[in-house]
Image (cartoon, rainbow, N blue to C red):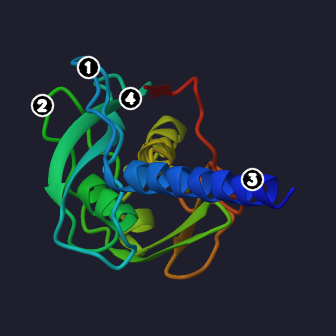
Amino acid sequence: MKKMTMLALTLCLVAGVAVGCALVDAAYNPTPTPDAGENPAPTPPKEEEETGFAATLVLYFADAQAEKVVAEVRDVTVASTLAETIVEELIKGPQSETLLGTIPAGTKLLGLTIEEGIAYVDVSVEMKTNHWGGSASEIMTIQSLVASLTELEDITAVQLLLEGQTEEAIFGHSCTLDPFEPDANVICR
């Protein structure tokens, strides 16, 4: 009986070590890059505070008809958090001449926090005062942010803040009091 107990404990110990090694291996070995033609997933940071690493981002900008937001893949060096870098790159606008910018000129990112899957994106007043207007362009701005940020696993929705405050309709038409989720009718993934 004592030998059976020792054998069972030894097997449990070996199994625990094997599972632990598999978890460590999975954590430190990145998944293979996607096939050509697929949008690569954003490169996750090792730690939230880590900066200065290279990442591949999938950013969404308006198509030429301003009917859909379309993916543009961009390699960047992360200077702050990955989510903040995404917004900063959206502010810079698209690199492709066939896509349209979605964030008004002069807009600054004032802060970004993530709580319970919601990214709270705090932007300067230029987001409102410099926005070109129209309900279609509002949707492009909102879904550009939402589609780009929800590429990150820990974000499922985006709440816009203007100078630290929620507003009923930052752009004039769309209610901006509640978080926005991805709209599959607008996002070309």
Label 2 or label 3, whichever lies nearer to me, is 3
Distance from disc 2 to disc 3, alpha carbons, whole Å, reads 65 Å
Residue 130 against residue 41 in the figure, above or below: below
Question: Residue 93: x, y in percent?
Answer: 22, 49
Sequence-earlier tag: 2 or 4: 4
> For the residue carrying disc 1, how many other residues have a C-alpha within 10 Å: few (<14), some (14-19), or many (20+)?
few
CB within 8 Å, label 4 to label 3: no
Which secondary structure lies at badge 1? loop
Residue denoted by label 3: 8
Sequence-earlier tag: 4 or 3: 3
Q: Quadrant of the N terminus?
A: bottom right
Residue 134 located left or right of residue 180: left
Label 4 or label 1, whichever lies nearer to me, is 1
Which secondary structure lies at badge 2? loop
Which secondary structure lies at badge 4? loop
Residue denoted by label 1: 35
Sequence-earlier tag: 1 or 2: 1
Sequence-earlier tag: 3 or 1: 3
Residue 122 against residue 11 in the figure, above or below: below
Q: Amino acid at mark 1?
A: Asp
Q: Amino acid at mark 2?
A: Glu
Question: Residue 119: x, y in percent?
Answer: 55, 63
Residue 188 located left or right of residue 8: left
Distance from disc 1 to disc 2, alpha carbons, whole Å, reads 25 Å
Residue denoted by label 2: 97
